[in-house]
Amino acid sequence: MPRAADNPPAIVLGGGIAGLAAARLLTRHYARVVVLERDTRPDAAEPESAFGAWQRRGVPQFRHSHAFLARLRLVLLAHLPEVLDRLRALGVRELGLAQLAPPGVTLAPEDGDDEVVLLACRRATFEWALRECVRGRPGVELREGVSVAGLSVAARDGRRPSVTGVRLTDGSVMRAALVVDATGRRSRAPAWLGAIGAPLPRELCADTGTFYYTRFYRRRHGRAPRGTTGLVAGDLGWVKVAIFPGDNASFSISVGAPVDDGSLRGLSEPARFEAFVRAFPAVAPWRARGVSVPIDGPPTPVLVMGNLRNRLRRFVDREGPLAAGFFAIGDAAYHSNPVYGRGATSAIVQAALLDEALGRHPGDVRAAGTAGRSARSHP
């Protein structure tokens, strides 16, 4: 049985949201789970330290605005309740429809409204809480500063390959009961699969045509500006701006601009960014004198993220998995324009779908790989 302690571990590539969630859920099926993460994160006693100290080279969106959608919260309730409890204890707020409605709008209650609840949280806080829950789980090992060069396979018998481990950049090979690729939007899965003779995943890809600026702040008195309620967002067609509520009186302001608009290239300079966002009437109260102060983490006060694409990769076709025992989740499989705020939610949902597939097909990674083909894995 897969849970026998002398069997190879389940290996998860990537220690972000997708990888950590998968690792926690894989403990239901495997006695040992090893997470291999390229970045090295110093120990942080609390999320605020993580926000300032963690340098996530493999996660360019780490210090940008995040949306933690209602479906993510529902999956946490069902599959990872201890993570939601930890987030609540850390000051993460749960925002229902009444709190999200624009000023002057009264909502007529409907069945299911109590399930439409967002989490107001920074990425660093969410990842720190998830990491702490995983680190305290028996049978889970987190290895950081480890880079993967490719996949290893069993002897071919004329069929598609079966993945039996990973090859590290130091030349060593780690055996695995299965391999989960949660390395994000920069995943090298197509190259890895091609190198072992597997079919390449079918891919749909389109440039978003947008780049983003983000800066974080903290409300001085812990309250939203007087007279402001609901979500703050605006789309002028050529530029987008939004305020994202965070934990512990934090919030972020993000600006999305078209890549071919040179006039907005200078917004990475803090003074220009401030002047630009304060020109929006809905944003100005949040940056009025005495209301908030910047939280300027490294590497710069205003962060820029570009070269963004919408991408969907299919790792299962009519014949089944492209390689048995290999699963791609999170941004490694699917990512879209950050303006939609789907990334973290998709990662958690896909980790839960993997958990369910393994539960339906214990010990049969090929069948488990096929089981998720028709599942709705993104919001």
Image (cartoon, rainbow, N blue to C red):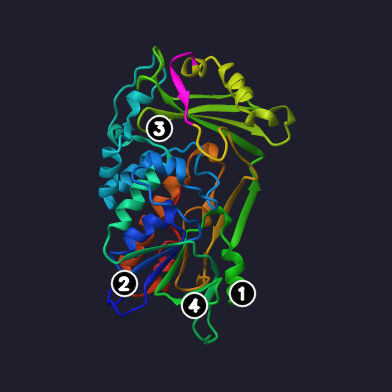
Distance between the Cα atoms at labels 1 and 4? 15 Å
Q: Nearer the viewer, mark 3 or mark 1?
A: 3
Give the amino acid type for the residue marked by disc 3 in the picture. Gly
- Quarter of the figure that contains the N terminus: bottom left
**Residue with the mark numbered 3:** 246
**Are the residues flagged by discs 1 and 4 in contact, CB closer than 8 Å?**
no
Residue position marked by numbered label 2 in the rendering = 362
Q: Secondary structure at mark 4?
A: strand
- Judge whether residue 291 is colored magenta: yes
Stretch in magenta: 288-295
Where does residue 344 sit, x and y in percent of width and height? 44, 46
Q: Say which of marks 2 and 3 sits in front.
A: 3
Identify the residue at horizontal 31%, vertical 33% (top origin): 94
Q: Is residue 81 left or right of residue 106?
A: left
The answer to whether residue 356 shows anywhere in this view is no
Q: On the image, numbered disc 4 is attached to which residue? A: 173
Where residue 241 appears, as percent x and y from the top left, is: 56, 26
